[in-house]
Image (cartoon, grey):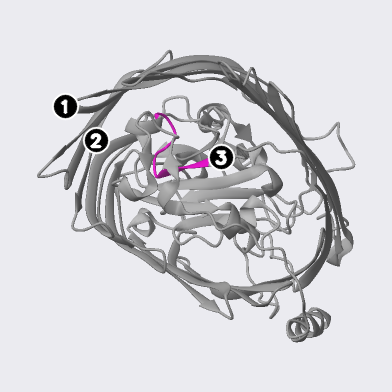
Amino acid sequence: MKTKLILLAILMSCFLGVSQEKLQKQNLDTVVIASTRIDLPFKENSRTINIISSEAIKNSAATNIADLLQQVAGVDIRRRGTAGSQADLYIRGGSFDQTLLLIDGIKMDDAQTGHHTMNAALPIEVIERIEIIKGPAARVFGQNAFTGAINIVTKKELKNKVAIKVEAGSFGQLNGGVTIGTDLENSSHLVHIEKVTSEGYRYNSDYDNSSYFIKSIFNKNKQAIEMVTSFQDRKLGANGYYASASAVDQYVATQNSLIGFSTAFKTEKLTLKPKVYWRRNQGEFLYVRSNPTGYRNLHISNKIGAELNGSYTSKAGITGFGVDVSKIYLESNNLGSRNRFMTTLFLEHRFKVFNDKLDVTPGVAVTYFSDFDFYAFPGLDIGYKINDALKVYGNIGYTYRVPTYTDLFYTSPDTAGNPDLEVEEAFALEIGIKYFSPKFSGSVAVYNRDAQNLIDYIRPNTTETVYTATNITDVNTKGLEVEAAYHFKLNTFNQTLAVGYNFLDDDILNQNKELSRYSLNTLKHHFTARLSTQLFKNISQNIIYKHAERTVGTSYNVWDASVAVNIKQLELMVTASNIFDADYIETGFVPMPPSNVLFGLRYNLN
């Protein structure tokens, strides 16, 4: 009730304001999708791709990537609490092991488990945009892009600036951060440091998270070399995260780090983009927080990788090619000492016919795993441009995922891995139409995925207490996705209304829900809406609505909102979440927080 009154007061204040510094609108028509070998303007791609621009991030009412991605239809973020808590990432009914996260094109997959994916997510202050590629993307990105991929693109223009933020709110939330940018004669640098804490909204749901990020461009006047590095340190009270609702004293601590270097060599026809990187993840789990000598898991994984991607332009079109080589090391008191060598070769060619109206891109990825042999996965993208604003498209392809080390070797009192697991495979297709103009954009897509050997944790009968990782029978998934955005002006100020809907139907429940542990929480209906308005120069407001209905029969409606007041270099913000106090669970045994509010202050020294 208190949160509702606060929000009402803020919304009423929207009619009082004077001077706001206008945020420069990012023109999506000029955005180039550069996470693959063939760089394409956003309008020209023949897949379902969402772009969350810096402006959309600003107007999202979200304070972190997990909350931001929840506003995209077809993307299922399953959180275990407020902003600093753990979250899992799913796209179009896949699992968290079947979605690939990239940072500036660097693959952040973890061979131990996809459960760590969102631990690598960056603070929104350093993000230029987010590219969401839906559907099978194995031929484009390789392993783990089974149902889609998300590429976080960090800020490109590293200007001289200092920005400070302080936030405080419900459940003892207290956050602080500083962003420093410097543009020197032959180098540029961006540094961000952040602390996010909370006492928790129920017993043992506190968190203490730290984030460090540095991006540098060296030798920028000649052959520029780009460096990106991040370190995320999370300490979480994990009441009900795993095992059962009665496991209230669990504790999780994770560390995720990345350092990568990249450059680009370009001529009129040839582009080469080499990169090298090292990603490390450490995860500790205590069944009883106060008893570290009791049941405890400690996993440390390292991935060292090198990539060379390129493209060659000729009269016949654009040929994309690449090689990705990586070595993985795992040390774990539960999973043992493991290592894996991977090599993936990529080849694709894009050409146009019929006065450049029809574009065709066949491609293939061939991967060697030292413990799973060779796999080849072809695909095809086709698009037809009806006019400059309207395009129909379709794509088909095979996709795959090798089991994680958790799938293969994990043991606990109620869970068992299976070293005899086979690779997950699927054949997927999609047909869509999209329209893009400065005022209105929209898309409709239908998709189908026939999967084999999907991995689930099942038990042979209801009397058995141990769930074992198993390749279950074939699973068919089909869906419909609709998205639209309308941009208009009131009193010379930009306004946006954006909506999205995803319907998904699969036959996973036919596998017997009484015997399965993890396959039963798919988003059957997912509707999102965002209204971003500005009525006066210094005040803007956003209202977010999310409806979710899962295959287990649960449904819920959640409303969030934010208001920002800008006074020269000072910005005051209030974000209200779950305004009407919806009672719901996104995953596991963790009820989501009741209505809550976060107050923020940001000061920019330019």
Which residue in the structure is indicated by mark 2?
379
Viewer can see residue 588: no
Q: CA distance from mark 3 to mark 1?
A: 30 Å
- Compared with 325, 577 (above or below) is below
The disc label shown at residue 153, or none: 3
Corner quadrant of residue 113: top right
Q: Earlier in the sequence, mark 2 or mark 3?
A: 3
Corner quadrant of residue 379: top left
- Compared with 365, 549 (above or below) is below
Magenta segment boundaries in residue numbering: 142-151
Give the percent coordinates (x, y) of residue 264: 48, 20
Which of 67 and 225 lies nearest the eye of the viewer? 225
Q: Amino acid at mark 3?
A: Val
The disc label shown at residue 316, or none: 1
Viewer-side label of 3, 1: 1
- Compared with 572, 159 (above or below) is above
